[in-house]
Image (cartoon, rainbow, N blue to C red):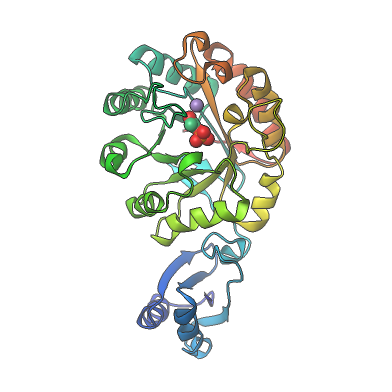
Amino acid sequence: MMIVMQETATAEEIEAVVSRVERAGAHAHRSEGARVTVIGAIGDVEQDACVADLGLEGQPGVDRVVPILKPYKLASAQFRHGERSILDIAGAKVGGGHFALIAGPCTVESRDQVLSTAHAVREGGAAMFRGGAYKPRTSPYSFQGLGVEGLKLLAEAKLQTGLPIVTELMDMRDIDAVLEVADVIQIGARNMQNYPLLSEVGRSGRPALLKRGLSARLDELLMAAEYILKEGNSDVMLCERGIRTFESSYRFTLDLMAIPVLKEMTHLPVIVDPSHAAGRRDLVAPLSLAAAAAGADGIIVEVHPRPDEAICDGPQALEADGFAEYATAVRSAAELAGRALSAV
Ligand code: PEP
Ligand code: MN
C-alpha cells in the first residue's frame, strides 16, 4: 500500500502515519520526493489488509492511499510516481539525466596495474573506478582475486585519483573488509539471487550495483533489488550485462531492450556492462554507444594497461591508452539521449 501525503503535510502528520502503519505490523518506507512524501506500507498479504483497514485516507496530511500493483513494490516506478532515482556516489551522480562512466580492470592484479589504470580512466573522464578483489570464476582452479591485498590497492587508487570505488562482494564474511573501501558494492550476475547477501548489502546502507543474472528475467532482477531496498537502502543501480540465449556466435546477448523496459518498470538507474556481454574488445565500443543512445544511465567497462597480460578477461578489456577516445564517443551518444556525463 502506498500512502501519498499532501504537499502541505507536516513532519508530525507524516510521523503519525508511519507509526500507525508500523502498529499494523507492516514496514513503513519513507520516500521524500521533490514535492511530496510517500510512505510505502510494505508487508505480507495479511499486513496489507490491516493497513487497508486503518482508514488512513481521512487522517490529517494524507492525500490518498493506493495499492502498489507490482510485487516489486519499492522498486516499482509507481512507488516514486514517475520520479527517477538519482544516486550520488561521493559526488558522481547516476540516473535522472546523469550518466556515469565506471571503468577499470576486471581484476586487481598488481599495484602498477591498478594505479596506472586508475589514472588513465580518471584522465579519460571516468566518474568511478572498478576492480575486483574477490572474483567469481567459472573454474575453481582459476585465479580467485587478491582479496584483502586487492582492497588495499583499490584504497590507494581512490586516494590518488579521488575516484569512488566499485568492487564486488561475493561472500558475507568479507563485508567488513569490502565496506572499508567500496563506495559501491557490486553484486555479480551469479549472486543476483543470493538473497541473504542482498539483505546484508541492504542493511549495510552502502550503494549497490546489482547485475542481472545470466538467465534472469527483468521482474526477477527487480525482486532481487527489492531485497536491498526493503532493508532501507534506496541506493541501488541495476546493470544489464548480457544474458544467455540460443546464439553462440558471441559470449552473451546484450539485452538492450532491457534499458527502456526497465525504465518503464522501475525508478532505479539502469547501467550497462558491454565488456562481459561481448567477451571481445572490438564489440565493446559499438555496444557502449548503443547502450548510451538507448538511454542507459551509465556504463561499467573493463580497461587494462596491457590486456594481453591480464590474468582475467583480457580479450574484452579496452586498452588504457585508448580510453579517453572511447569516453569521448560514449559521451556524445549519452548526450544524444539527453544525458550529461558525471564527473567527480
Ligand atoms: C565482473 O564485473 O567482473 C563480473 C564478473 O561480472 P558478472 O558478474 O556480470 O559476470
Ligand atoms: Mn571481468
Q: Give 152 or 313, whichever is nearer the viewer.
A: 313
Query: Compared with residue 241, is residue 216 higher up or lower down, i.e. above or below?
Result: below
Q: Residue at x 68, y 22 (%)?
A: 283
Residue 102: tell me if it is visible: yes
Relative image position of residue 242 (x, y in whole percent):
62, 36
Residue 90: tell me if it is visible: no
Q: Give 235 or 186, whichever is nearer the viewer.
A: 186
Q: Give 244 or 24, whichever is nearer the viewer.
A: 244
Query: Compared with residue 79, is residue 326 higher up or lower down, i.e. above or below?
Result: above
Count of residue discs: 0
Residue 268 as seen in the image, left or right of residue 59: right
Residue 172 as seen in the image, left or right of residue 142: left
Query: Compared with residue 94, is residue 324 higher up or lower down, i.e. above or below?
Result: above
Residue 138 as seen in the image, left or right of residue 335: left
Relative image position of residue 327 (x, y in whole percent):
61, 24
Relative image position of residue 57 (x, y in whole percent):
53, 87
Relative image position of residue 233 (x, y in whole percent):
41, 55
Q: Residue at x 38, y 49 (%)?
A: 197
Q: Residue at x 57, y 47 (%)?
A: 269
